[in-house]
Image (tube, helix red, strand yellow):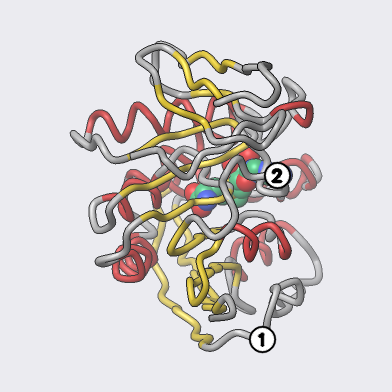
Amino acid sequence: MTGALICPVCGEPLSAGERAFVCTGRRGKVHSFDRGADGTVNLAGGGYRPASGDPPDMVAARSAFLRAGWYAPLAERVAAAAEGLGAVADAGCGEGFYSVTAAKRCGFLYGFDLSKKAVSRAAKLARAEGLSNTLFSVASVFSLPLADRSVDAVFSVFAPVAREEFFRVLRPGGSLFVAAAGAEHLCELKAVLYDTVRKNEPRADLPAEPVSRETLTFSRTLPRDALLALYRMTPYCRRSSPESEARLLALPELSVTFSFDLYRCEAEK
Ligand SMILES: C[S@@+](CC[C@H](N)C(=O)[O-])C[C@H]1O[C@@H](n2cnc3c(N)ncnc32)[C@H](O)[C@@H]1O
C-alpha cells in the first residue's frame, strides 16, 4: 500500500513496481525512481543535495543510543499515538526508531528524511523487525511526495516542522504529533558543557493551536558509552569547546533528565 505517493517532479500519482516507482505521466511524460537494494527510494526531486540531513556519525550515534532503549518511554507514546491508524507519515524519521515502533500499530508507515544514510538504516531496521508495511524515502519534510489529504497522521519527532506541508497531506481531522525538547531536557549534560544553561522554549512553529500538550519527563543514570552516544547525537557535539568535551569525557556516568513536550494538532474537518 503505497497509494499516497506522488511524483516529486510532476505531482502525478506514483505506482510501485518491482524495481522502481513510476508516475502515471502527464502529456506522455513519465518519471521513474529506482528502488535501492535496501528497498528505499529517492523522492527528493530537485531539493536533494548529497550532504543533506544529519551526517553519518550523528546518525550512527543516535542509532546506538535509541536502540539501547534509553528513550523507551517516548517510543511507547509514539506507539500509542499510532494505534489503529491507517497511513502515517514520519517526517524527519532519521534511522527509523520511532517509525518502526509506529508501524507495528498502524496500517502503513511512510518514513521521510533527507539523510540517505538514515533512511537506509530505517529500512534495514524495519526489515529486521519483519515489517512489510513501511516505505522509507529520501525526501524533504518541506516537500513531501504525498498526495493532498492522503494520510491519517504525521509524526515529527525532533525534526523540522513544515507547517503548511503537514496540513496539506493530512486528511481532514487527521493529527499532527510533534515531539520536541522540553524545558529541562538534558540540563545536566548542558551544565557539564556550558557555563550558562538555558532552558528550551516551547515550540512556536506549530501550524495550529495544539488540541493537546503534555510533558513527559524522566531521568536515567547513563554510563560513559551511552553518555557519549547521547552527546554525539546532539548539536552540542558540533558546538562545544575541546575543554568542555574533555570534562564530559572524564565522567564515568551522569544522571540526565529527559523531557519531551508532546503536542497534537488537528487538521480541519
Ligand atoms: C534530531 S533527528 C531526529 C530523527 C528521528 N525523528 C528521531 O527522533 O530519532 C532530525 C532528523 O531530521 C532530518 N532532517 C533535517 N532537515 C530535514 C528536512 N528538511 N527534511 C527531511 N528531513 C530532515 C535529519 O536528517 C535528521 O535525521
- Residue drawn at x 64%, y 79% as measured from the top left: 183
* Pointer 1 local density, CA inside 10 Å: few below 14, some 14–19, many at least 20: few
Quick check: which quadrant has ligand 1? top right
Image quadrant where one finds the N terminus: top left
From the viewer's perspective, tell me whether residue 108 is left or right of residue 238.
left
Is 232 above or below relative to 263? above
User: What label sits on residue 178 in the rendered view?
Assistant: none
Q: Quadrant of residue 261?
A: bottom right
Q: Nearer the viewer, residue 65 or 27?
A: 27
Q: Position of residue 138 (x, y in %)?
A: 59, 31
Q: Residue at x 61, y 35 (%)?
A: 12
The residues bearing labels 1 and 2 have C-alpha atoms spaced at a distance of 22 Å
Q: Amino acid at mark 2?
A: Ser
Q: Is residue 152 visible?
A: yes
Query: Is 230 in front, or is 244?
Result: 230
Residue 209 badge: 1
In the image, 153 versus 197, the foreground residue is 153
Q: Amino acid at mark 1?
A: Glu
Q: Which mark is residue 143?
A: 2
Question: Is disc 2 surrounded by few (<14), some (14 to 19) or many (20+) residues within 10 Å?
Answer: some
Asked if residue 250 shows in the view, the reply is: no
The numbered mark, 1 or 2, whose residue comes first in the sequence reads 2
Name which residue lies at 48% across and 71% down: 174
Q: Nearer the viewer, mark 1 or mark 2?
A: 2
Q: Position of residue 214 (x, y in %)?
A: 49, 85
Q: Is residue 178 left or right of residue 190?
A: left
Determine the residue positioned at 28% across, 57% down. Answer: 106
**Image vertical order of residue 249 relative to residue 18, above or below:** below
**Label 1 residue near ligand 1, CB within 8 Å:** no
Q: Percent x, y for residue 156? A: 55, 59
Q: Disc 2 on helix, strand or loop?
A: loop
Quarter-of-image position of residue 200: bottom right
